[in-house]
Image (spheres, grey):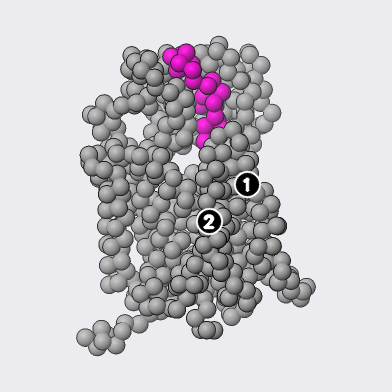
């Protein structure tokens, strides 16, 4: 038992990586303009559901298991040995991977925008979002007259009024307002249409919205006011515009100044000085892309060292009852809720892929990481945690069902509470499930677990390239999605077998592996 007891944790870590491929494989079907590929057969309702199921627990689970293994490595090799091993396994792939991925992702963004624009123009599109993109007021009016919902959400989860504000269609904004659009309706980040218009310098839209009574002192979930969005550093506008494929021209800075003047005239206030603008650029500018988790893991390992040294000096062991289930949830739920409330817009943790660590996100994952570290060496972890895994999983269902609706509606705090419960309940269920069925160290599962790190590191550009290539294919979304995931995974498994596993690359990722005798002799 002693030699096998951690196989289920290796499997959990591997599944967390592999689910990332599934998650990214579905991104092109969200109708989400930030993603390089937007599929002609997008099905936002289905794929947002799938994304929330996975995103709500995947990375918290990964960081919890990583904390456990970090503590194990600390005890086995000491501080220096642990740091050396982590820098090799995490730091080297992060640096090399970022150097390779960043220019590739820039090219994929450009290619994806061109392809999406071509099929959008050729297909004509249906629905309010398509009509707004086209700037077709007549089509918008016809759709509204036929019963289209003026508060319809686009692929990013924001009301279509925001879309009309971003593209600068003042006449369409008026039509939507007449059709019943909520003037101060909020998008995924808590922005209003007036914020979106002021941010991109859409003077006509700002005038229309002010005249219709929009709240000129609204704040989004980051605490930015309407006036702040109009006066943010222009480099932020350029960055966001590039991500959303919004054209940026030379006159936009002057138009943003005009928007700010209009807002000030009607009493808009700005209680912030903008000194944090560059910090937020560093937080969100896509440097690491899907490799951000390695960067944050390095930060947590660096924090772990002094914490572990202090704990060793104090010499007192935290009582077992503090970390046993279900009692541990009494302090884990409120503690996790604290950073969760600072990450709005998604069911689960927020996303930031820049060079500056986002303190709220780092704190959120630190809770899971250090809880995992606390659990190392405790018998209940290997033998009892989540033993009734099906009960924990069933208990998570209502939190998921109601929470994902609340978090994007008016009951945000309720939704965030549900998101925290969902994350912990599913993690405990997964621990029990994998220990029950996948703790035998089966060679095939071990192989898949070893390969998962490589698969995750290398999959994203291949996934996106295939998504772009197939995005205009008039074929059902689910078979297309399954083909993308299967094709990329199969190809990378082949590469792993012959060019990674038994080479210096595999030695860095998973330790030195040796060919089976029957293969090495041949």
Which residue was labeled with disc 2? 394
What segment is highlighted magenta in the picture?
Answer: 174-196
Where's residue 203, x and y in %?
A: 49, 16
Residue 272 lies in quadrant: top right
- Number of labels in the image equals 2
Tell which tag, 2 or 1, sits nearer the viewer: 2
Residue for point 77% across, 74% down: 316
Which residue is located at x 67 percent, y 22 percent?
Answer: 269
- Is residue 415 located in the magenta-colored stretch of the structure? no
Q: Is residue 246 above or below residue 385?
A: above
Q: Secondary structure at mark 2?
A: helix
Most extreme residue toward the top is 211
Label 1: state its secondary structure: helix
Res 417 label: 1
Q: Foreground: 261 or 481?
A: 481
Residue 158 position, x and y percent, is 48, 31
Check the image and report above or below for 431 versus 290: below
Examine the image and state in which quarter residue 270 appears: top right
Q: Residues within 10 Å of mark 1 (few under 14, many from 20)?
A: many
Q: Earlier in the sequence, mark 2 or mark 1?
A: 2
């Amino acid at each position: 038992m002693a030699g096998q007891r951690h196989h289920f944790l290796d499997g959990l870590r591997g599944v967390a990586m592999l689910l990332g491929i599934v998650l990214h494989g579905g991104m092109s079907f969200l109708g989400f303009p930030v993603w390089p590929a937007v599929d002609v057969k997008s099905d936002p309702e289905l794929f947002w559901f799938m994304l929330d199921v996975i995103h709500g627990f995947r990375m918290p689970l990964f960081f919890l298991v990583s904390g456990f293994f970090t503590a194990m490595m600390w005890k086995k090799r000491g501080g220096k040995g642990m740091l050396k091993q982590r820098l090799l396994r995490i730091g080297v792939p992060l640096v090399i991977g970022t150097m390779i991925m960043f220019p590739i992702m820039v090219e994929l963004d450009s290619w994806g925008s061109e392809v999406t624009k071509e099929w959008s123009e050729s297909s004509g599109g249906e629905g309010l979002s398509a009509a707004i993109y086209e700037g077709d007021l007549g089509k918008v009016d016809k759709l509204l007259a036929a019963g289209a919902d003026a508060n319809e959400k686009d692929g990013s989860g924001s009301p279509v009024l925001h879309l009309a504000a971003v593209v600068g269609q003042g006449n369409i904004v008026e039509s939507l307002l007449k059709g019943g659009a909520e003037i101060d309706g909020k998008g995924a980040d808590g922005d209003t249409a007036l914020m979106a218009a002021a941010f991109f310098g859409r003077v006509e839209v700002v005038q229309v919205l002010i005249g219709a009574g929009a709240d000129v002192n609204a704040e989004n979930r980051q605490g930015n006011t309407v006036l702040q969005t109009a006066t943010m550093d222009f480099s932020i506008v350029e960055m966001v515009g590039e991500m959303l494929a919004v054209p940026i021209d030379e006159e936009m800075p002057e138009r943003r100044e005009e928007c700010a003047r209009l807002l000030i005239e009607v009493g808009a206030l700005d209680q912030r000085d903008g000194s944090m603008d560059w910090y937020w650029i560093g937080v969100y500018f896509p440097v690491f892309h899907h490799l951000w988790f390695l960067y944050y893991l390095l930060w947590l390992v660096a924090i772990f060292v002094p914490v572990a040294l202090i704990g060793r000096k104090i010499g007192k062991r935290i009582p077992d009852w503090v970390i046993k289930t279900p009692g541990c949830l009494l302090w884990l739920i409120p503690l996790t809720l604290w950073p969760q409330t600072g990450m709005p817009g998604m069911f689960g943790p927020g996303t930031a892929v820049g060079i500056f660590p986002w303190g709220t996100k780092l704190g959120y994952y630190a809770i899971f990481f250090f809880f995992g570290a606390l659990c190392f060496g405790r018998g209940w972890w290997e033998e009892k945690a989540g033993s009734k895994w099906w009960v924990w999983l069933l208990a998570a269902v209502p939190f998921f069902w109601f929470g994902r609706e609340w978090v994007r509606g008016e009951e945000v705090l309720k939704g965030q509470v549900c998101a925290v419960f969902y994350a912990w309940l599913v993690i405990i269920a997964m621990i029990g499930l994998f220990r029950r069925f996948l703790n035998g160290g089966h060679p095939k599962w071990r192989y898949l677990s070893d390969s998962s790190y490589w698969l995750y590191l290398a999959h994203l550009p291949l996934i996106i390239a295939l998504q772009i290539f197939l995005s205009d294919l008039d074929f059902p979304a689910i078979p297309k999605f399954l083909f993308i995931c299967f094709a990329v995974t199969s190809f990378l498994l082949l590469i792993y077998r012959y060019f990674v596993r038994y080479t210096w690359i595999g030695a860095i990722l998973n330790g030195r592996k040796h060919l089976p005798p029957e293969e090495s002799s041949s």
